[in-house]
Amino acid sequence: MADTATQHYGDDAVDTAVLDGAVDPYPRNRLYVQVAILLAVLTALEVMVHSFPGLFGGMGSPGYITALLITMFVKFWAVGYFFMHLKWDNKILNRVFYTGFILAVLVYVAIMLMFRLFSQGGA
Amino acid sequence: MAETTVYDPEVGADVESFHPTHDTNTGISNTKLGMWLFLGSECLLFGGLITTYLVYKYPLEGQGPGPQDVFDIPFTSASSFVLLMSSLTMVLAVSAIERGDHHRTRTWLGATALLGSAFVAGQVYEFTAFYNEGLGFTTSRFSSAFYGLTGFHGVHVTVGIIMLVSLLFLSVRGKLPEHRSETVEVVGLYWHFVDLVWIFIFAVVYLIP
């Protein structure tokens, strides 16, 4: 088992035989640190966007909101994909999680439709 | 658990599977699948809370301060960074227990609990500062939605800290061998989810006007 892991990731490989549902060997710690650095950089970028909104078209402009949404979703993806092992785990777990996430987005859309679009249309 | 074989295209034959599977329909342990189902349902809970906040984020006339009057972005950014780094220490704890490195497991679990505690302490400080500025829980619809959302998240972080400290005690007492590493992994999933939720809250609640 450990030999198989070594073939994939070298001497620093992790024997993850005890982890259930995983379909690939797990990554090394170096990758985790790289992801954490990416997250820190993206957080700094978010703060920069907020501190200098003029660079992105002004506070609340489409450019400003788009920049923040992109950084937010990249951070969301990085944590889920690498730290929560969705990249390597059984795809059923991806479906379970993203089903809940998509339902949550639908709840958001439904409520926004009720409170914003419908009321504005009525007005 | 059951050993299985899979076809390896590089070898050109069936080889022993790298990961043994559980004797369940999915091949995933019930504990892990249960945690993922729980996290899926938690998406709905926080989706509802975030949406409620967005609907009520602007207080009515004369109902006290609004979001841009009270938020301290540099302070909250530091808190966000602390919580993000706690995700790193958590995943390092999972990695350590898989290797059977109990000393590092305890170190990283303790670091995660400490970083989580720092985040909660920051939230308590923030709430106190807001209250002193005249923003109580019932001051306005904004304050109720804000405290409801961030308070729920804070409770989740606190529950996570309790689980981490419990794991730490189990490890110190020698009751967390590497063959139970899935326990640490499942707690880690919960912790990372709490981090995921904060990534949304930080951007949507604090940064986007």
Image (spheres, rainbow, N blue to C red):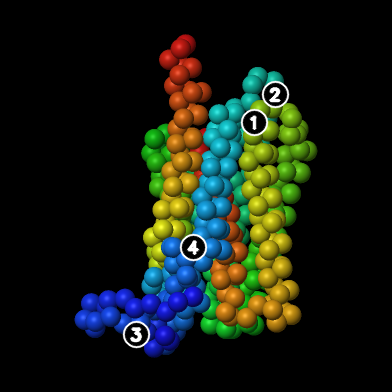
Residue under the image location 64 percent in, 31 percent down:
B142
Instruction: Compare marks 3 and 4 and give the one earlier in the sequence.
Output: 3
Q: CA distance from mark 2 to mark 3?
A: 64 Å
Is there a contact, CB below 8 Å, between mark 3 and mark 1? no
Q: Element type at marker 4?
A: loop
Residue under the image location 66 percent in, 55 percent down:
B157
The residue that label 3 is drawn on is A7
The residue that label 2 is drawn on is B63
Q: Name which quarter of the figure residue A12 lies in.
A: bottom left
**Residue B142's disc number:** 1
Q: In the image, what residue type sits under mark 4?
A: Met
Q: Element type at marker 1?
A: helix
Chain ID of residue with mark 2: B
Q: CA distance from mark 3 to mark 1?
A: 55 Å
Is there a contact, CB below 8 Å, between mark 1 and mark 2? yes
Q: Is residue A102 above or below residue B161?
A: above
Q: CA distance from mark 4 to mark 2?
A: 41 Å
Q: In the image, what residue type sits under mark 2?
A: Gln
The residue that label 4 is drawn on is A84
Relative depth, front residue between B13 and B185: B13
Q: Nearer the viewer, mark 1 or mark 4?
A: 4
Residue under the image location 35 percent in, 82 percent down:
B16
Q: CA distance from mark 3 to mark 4?
A: 23 Å
Q: Position of residue B42 (x, y in %)?
A: 56, 48
Q: Position of residue B140 (x, y in %)?
A: 69, 27
Q: In the image, what residue type sits under mark 1?
A: Phe
